[in-house]
Image (spheres, rainbow, N blue to C red):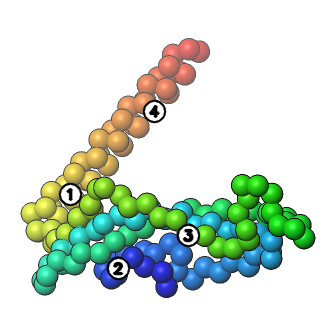
Amino acid sequence: RLAFGESFPNSVNPLDGTTRYLELDSVHQYFFKVVPTTFHPLNGEPLSTNQFSVTESTKVVGGNLFGFADGQKSPGVYFSYELSPIRVNYSQSHSSVTQFLTSVCAIVGGVFTMSGIVVKFYQMTIGKATSGK
């Protein structure tokens, strides 16, 4: 497990459970972008931690007996990271009953509106098809 701090609920570490098998004369590079994160649980103290994203690259360098060409890295695994200047804040919250009911009403209203549009379009299409005869 690779992490840049403590984990919190629903946090994802992109390299968990990954395995790489490389050729002996290859360079494998990981580029990490680390984002400072604060998690505010419903009960308890805020947790300051970090999240990260990762990209990776593999290249076979194909060295010879006397070494590698100028500017080439020697075979190995390289890690580089960049710290983000922006902090992400996660806060746990519960929705109230009124917010839930408002969301349900919005969904039901949207369904009725879309079904009305579809019916009107259908009626216009059928009307044009029958009047064209």
- Which disc is residue 119 wearing? none
Local secondary structure at mark 2: loop
Mark 2 surroundings within 10 Å by alpha-carbon count, few (fewer than 14), some (14 through 19), many (20 or more) = few
Residue corresponding to mark 4: 122
Which one is in front in this view, the residue at disc 2 or the one at disc 1? 2
Q: Nearer the viewer, residue 38 or 108?
A: 38
Label 3, residues with CA under 10 Å away: few <14, some 14-19, many ≥20: few
Which residue corresponds to the image point at 39% horizontal and 76% vertical from the top-left? 4
Residue 130, position as x, y percentages in the image: 53, 21
**Residue on which disc 2 sits:** 5
Point out the tag, 3 or 2, that comes first from the N-terminus: 2
Residue 37 in percent (x, y) is at 28, 68
The local secondary structure at tag 1 comes to helix
Residue shown at 36% from the left, 35% from the top: 117
Left or right: where 111 falls relative to 65: left
What kind of element bears circle 4? helix
Crowdedness of circle 4 by 10 Å Cα count: few (<14), some, many (20+)? Answer: few
Task: In the rendered structure, find residue 103 and report the number of the disc placed on it.
Answer: 1
